[in-house]
Image (spheres, coloured by chain):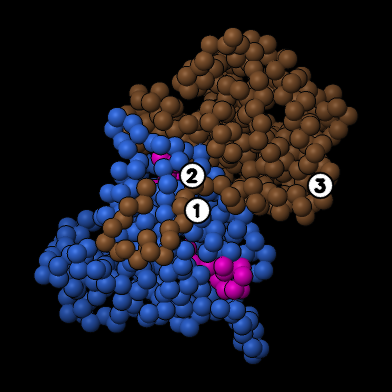
Chain colours: A blue, B brown
Amino acid sequence: MKELFRRAPKAFTPGEQTPEQGTPDNMWVKCPSCGDLTYVKQLRDNLKVCKCGHHMRLSAFEWQGLFDSDSFIQEDGDIAPLDPLNFVSPKDNYAQKLRDSQQETGLYDAMISGSATLMGQPLQVTISEFEFIGGSMGSVFGEKIARAAERAYGRRVPLLTINASGGARMHEGVLALMQLPKVNLALARLGSIGMPHISLMTDPCYGGVLASYASVADIIIAEPGARIGFAGRRVIEQTIRQKLPANFQSAEFMLEHGMIDMVVPRTDMRNTLARLFKLYTMRDASATPIPADV
Amino acid sequence: MKTPLSAWDKVQISRHVQRPRTLDYVRVLCEDFFELHGDRRFADDAAIVGGVGRINGRSVVIVGHQKGRDTRENMRRNFGMPKPDGYRKAMRLFHHAEKFALPVICLIDTPGADPSMESETRGQGNAIAENILVMAQLKTPLVSLVIGEGGSGGALAIGVTDRILMLENSIYSVAAPEASAAILWRDSSKAPDAAKTMRITAQDLLEMRIIDDIIPEPEGGAHNDADNTVRLAGARIMHHINELSQMPLSALLDQRYQKYRVMGAFTTLSTSQTNEGDALPFV
């Protein structure tokens, strides 16, 4: 069984972490779902999906491996966060938190964006990084999505957003909240030229992300087991004073309740996306495709 | 001279049980009004009221959160926390306003969207997101006034407007102070600290250029002279609606796009800064 698993054809290769960030190859990883240990290299070969089917989180960097090799070109990489509220409290200091997260992740903020091709199809892409303050949506996050949508509009290419976020970034106050209309306005403009936005929800997608671009996409795809919701589980349990069912707010639960279009395993993701995008960019296969203006 | 109030004082005033609510504005301001009910999908959510009415001889659509004044009414109105059905009722009224070219007045007063299993199951996140999208493109002028609490996405779902006004002692926050404290420090009793740190007062938001206008309140808060506060607010709202109504639609929509497009605080680094891969001194 193990051998079969190992020989499964690779759907894509996750981007390699830089040596100081990545786990050394000679380590074993314990699956948080089934508790089994898997050799790191083997896990990576299977896109960090455990034998039990549990999808472990990919970093924003690793997700770049979804695209045609070396096709991802970062854009707007020069945007960095500020501390607009001078957020200092006895327990928390935003400026320090930003510095620490930047050191940890090597990113300026919780979002990487750029252009890429997927099986030849040019795309604009945004990928959120959950390890950076819970993938929270602040000004940089919102600005990068708005610019990606505007670039997709200008270049007449589809937009793919790969999402993992706990919600709006508290430390930026109402400025963070106002990113919701900002990104939705830019998406509306993209929609006006008939270019699709596909939202890929990975674990987890909560709060502000769900209440804006991620849930008004033309197509919503979730990874198996991804937790998706507006209010967090803890908040709801405190409000109703009882335990919630285990599958509540799972991708499968959301599919059953009509909130998303499909649940797609990571190993099928590249193929699924390529086929979908093709249906919108090559609407009549006998005619010439709509040229991308890259 | 008025005594300076702390952010936490304002939180208390914004939640005062006698503070004028949406239906008080309707009663004082409208020469005529019909409440319109239901989302035509599932329910009529009493946490949001809306309808068509006339102010200063002008037909308008009004949509607002509605809190109760006693426990019984608060239960019925879910403390002003809308479920998806409430937002979908609001959306229906936005489309209605667009169809008949009526300006929209949104009155914001909610601790936040309802956090419950049924709201999640019926798509709370999606309901809010869809409203934001619809308001962003609505082909008629929209003006919002925060009359009490502007709590998070629950407020924004009826708050994407051409002009955003706040009463002097109202608040607008990314999450209610208690929720912010729970998220940040896992301790909702630190809400007063959150209120101060997160800059949620009308004065803070005007300074950050998020809102456009502040309506003064009598000393101690709007409840001390409710009808006059409401009349003053009504006059300011109609002033903004008159201004917006004179703009061509395309200019109005462009201006709305720009209004939200520039919101946010970030810096753009120079090439030399971004090339220094080892140092990350960004803030």
Q: What amino acid is labelled 3 in the image?
A: Met
Badge 1 marks a residue whose secondary structure is helix
Tag 1: amino acid: Gly
- Would you name the residue on which mark 2 appears? A176
Please provide percent x and percent y for residue A66.
Answer: 38, 74
Mark sitting on residue A142: 1
A62 displayed left or right of B251: left
Chain of the residue that carries numbered disc 3 in the rendered image: B
Whether residue A157 appears in magenta in the rendering, the answer is yes
CB within 8 Å, label 3 to label 1? no
Residue extending furthest toward the right: B57
Question: Badge 1, how many Cα within 10 Å: few under 14, some, many 20+?
Answer: many
Identity, as a three-letter code, of the amino acid under mark 2: Ala
With B172 as the anchor, is A14 left or right in this view?
A: left
Is A170 part of what is drawn in magenta? yes
Q: Percent from the top left, x then y, of residue A244?
A: 36, 41
Badge 2 element: helix
Q: Nearer the viewer, residue A67 or B239?
A: B239
Q: Which residues are magenta?
A: A151-172
Q: Quadrant of residue A50?
A: bottom left
**To which residue does mark 3 refer?**
B247
